[in-house]
Amino acid sequence: MGMKRSTSPMGQPYRAADLRRTEMTPMTEVDALAPSPDGVWAHENVVVRHLHGLELDAVRTGTTVQVCHGLTSAEIGERLIPMITAQARHVGLSQREFELVLVGVVRSTISDPVDAWTTYYRNSLRELNSGTADFASVHERAETSIVGSVLDLGSCFGFFPLRLAMKGHSVTATDLSAGTMRLLATVAPRLGVTLDTIVCDAADVPVADSSVDTVTALHLLEHVDAETGSRIMAEALRIARIRVVVAVPYETETTTCHGHVRTFDRAALIELGRSTDARFQTSEHHGGWLVVDKAAAPQLT
């Protein structure tokens, strides 16, 4: 089947960070670095096999999802997200199965687990930084909004923190998934990048008040309910000295295979901004943006 669609029904970009875990979606950790036979990766009800010459194709047989593909090392990166999304619609993948298929495709393409993930990261960063990946425009816009040191909430694979660290920013990536943060900490040195990682709930980050200049939450809030989202915003405002930057997709219905549990529009984003009791601006650029400013005269770190 064709696999060209790379945006949500409302034209928002899909990306690997949509696979994030939150307190709303507790899951058993997947060890993405665990040994596996060459060309085959299996976990729970998902089996992925690498067979030369085949396009990515998924079939559900009972409760088992069988995936075959012939992708090369040059093809594993952010481009996988729209490809797997097409299959998700075709066979009805859950968020969990979506995540397992992605891990399986990466791991079945290159035998060594660290080499496989380093390749995935290199390719993804190249696609994002060159503007060819669907989510590149979001990262570009977010980068123009940050000042000074940054703590990123719900970082997932950590592509945005890596982007900032490569340009000299002091960056901390955070995520509820210990496995994802371990993966980021393993790959970052191989990319020549230094950053910090913290495993934590986005609504309960173990750092001091006003400890960084900017806190970012890029396509995170659609993964949690409104009450949890309010707690995440309060935590972001506690941590940030100067600014909080929020990006959300504008959708009329939730993209469940990516773990979305609520939708946003301009009115909802304005309401969220007003709830902060601080100066804020909203805008639209490949989704909605909320920038909350706490300090007019920054003292950068």
Image: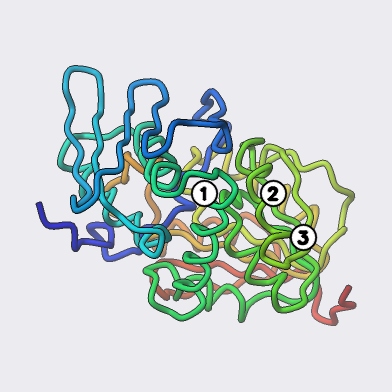
Mark nearer the N terminus (2 vs 3): 2
- Read off the residue under disc 2: 186
Q: Residue furthest top?
A: 62
Mark 1 vs mark 3: in front: 3
How far apart marks 1 and 3 lie (CA) works out to: 24 Å
How far from the left and from the top, in percent, is residue 111? 48, 44
Mark nearer the N terminus (1 vs 2): 2
How far apart marks 2 and 3 lie (CA) works out to: 11 Å
Residue 177 or residue 273, whichever sits in front:
177
For residue 243, say whether it is visible.
yes
Q: Quadrant of residue 31?
A: top right
Circle 2 residues within 10 Å: few <14, some 14–19, many ≥20: some
How far from the left and from the top, in percent, is residue 64? 25, 22
How far from the left and from the top, in percent, is residue 139? 53, 71
Give the residue type at disc 2: Thr
- Helix, strand or loop at label 3? It is loop
Circle 3 residues within 10 Å: few <14, some 14–19, many ≥20: some
Name the image quarter holding the C terminus.
bottom right
- Read off the residue under disc 3: 195
